[in-house]
Amino acid sequence: MKFTFIFGLILISAMAYADDVWLKGASVVDPLTKTIKKTDLHLVNGKVRRGTAPKAATAKVRIIDLAGKWIIPGLYDMHVHATFGNPGPGQSYQVAPPSEIAKIVLYAGVTGFLDLFAAEEEIFFAREQTRKDPKYADIYAAGPMFTCTKGHGTDLGRPTRVVNTPKEAEVQVRELAAKKPDAIKISMDRNIGPVLDMPTLKATIETARKLGIKNIVHIGTWADADDALRAGADVITHLGWTDVPDATLALMKEKKVMEIPTMTYQTELLHILENRRLLNAPLLLGMIPADLLAGYRGMDVPDRFTAHELEIQIRGRASFPVSLKKIVAAGIPVISGTDAGDLGVFHGYSIHREMSLLVDAGATTWDALASATSRAKAFLKRPLGIGEGELADLVVLGGNPIEDIANTQLVEKVFHRGVEIDRGAAVAGLKLSAK
Ligand SMILES: [Zn+2]
């Protein structure tokens, strides 16, 4: 017994910090200072140390020559549904538990994500189960959605939290807070059903705030956004299906809200329908089962659910980019999140598309990179991953992402908690299951 115990400890510590490695000669891209500097990084005990790499490796210290390469902080996807797997049109569906999703996304340089709706027991268990193990991306989770009777969230066939009065809101937020959610998610969607009344919405937000928990509000219409803003939303996620009204935009600015637009979810299925070459991106091909992609290639005759999603995207297509352009131009801080777990979105890969769609809407490449790194991590109070003394989470790229944001897809190496990820092994367990 004693032997097993000690042996187990040795294994754990070896697993946690296997690497003592110098990354030599790369250009380090820092979205906080908007600078690119050739800097050697020493990853030791999971942390970043800056300095000058030694001339030669030793038995204990590796040197990786990264001349001509770029280093960015590990990417974060701030709107995912890790328990939903990767759905596809027709009968294709990639089912994977959230821990498996946390493994797969590292292939694409995603070192952490925020889950914004899941059965709370399942997602909080996965978060604890994978915590601090470098071979899983870091899971952050909100758990359920707070909604009202018959409101959006009750229609998804999963347990959620229904609150109809300020008193109920207070009780339920306190109950969830005991499980330490990383944020709370509130659903306000007049496109789908009734929404929380203002006193209940305010009580939900204020109870969470008293307990030190930030909120993210799902909106379906701009009227939902107006309510959320007046009640004290920290972050709004999604865009309404019409052009954002000037009054809403002004309120967003006044209230200093942040926005997670989920452009991938709102537009990408239609983009794929119209341009199947989008499915040929090497990063996507490397991490998604071919059968699942075949479902997308063959969606000229969509099944009922796919047709329904396409209809929504066609309805909103004129307005989604217009609203995002206005939000970017108004200087409202955008955080990247994809809504992975929905059709047209792929866990891991799609954060790269989200950044590109943000640049298409007028954001600078620096801003797009910040949306998936520094700004996302600041919300979660997580270190950036490339600074002196910080927990090392970083991605080595074969191209400069500031010249072209699509270069973030040229992922060559991923380091998570200071350990180099075996990217092949991360996606080796990929399986496709029928619906
Ligand atoms: Zn979502």
Image (cartoon, rainbow, N blue to C red):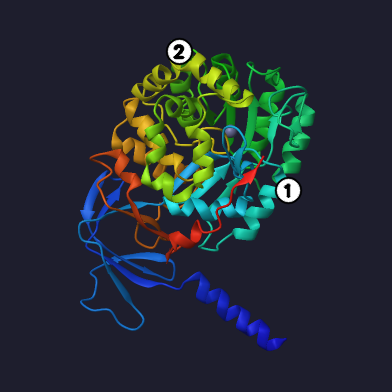
The residue tagged with tag 2: helix, strand or loop?
A: loop
Does the beta carbon at disc 1 come under 8 Å from ligand 1? no
Task: Reply above or below: 217 against 42.
Answer: above
The amino acid sitting under disc 2 is Asp
Residue 171: image location, x then y, percent: 78, 36
Q: Quadrant of ligand 1?
A: top right
Task: Reply above or below: 224 against 177.
Answer: above
Residue 90 in view (yes/no)? yes
Classify the position of the C terminus by image quarter.
Answer: top right
Q: Is residue 287 left or right of residue 139?
A: left
Residue 31 in view (yes/no)? no
Residue assigned mark 1: 121
Q: Earlier in the sequence, mark 1 or mark 2?
A: 1
Q: Is residue 361 left or right of residue 202?
A: left
Residue assigned mark 2: 243
Residue at 63% of width from left, 16% of height from top? Answer: 191
The residue tagged with tag 1: helix, strand or loop?
A: helix
The amino acid sitting under disc 1 is Glu
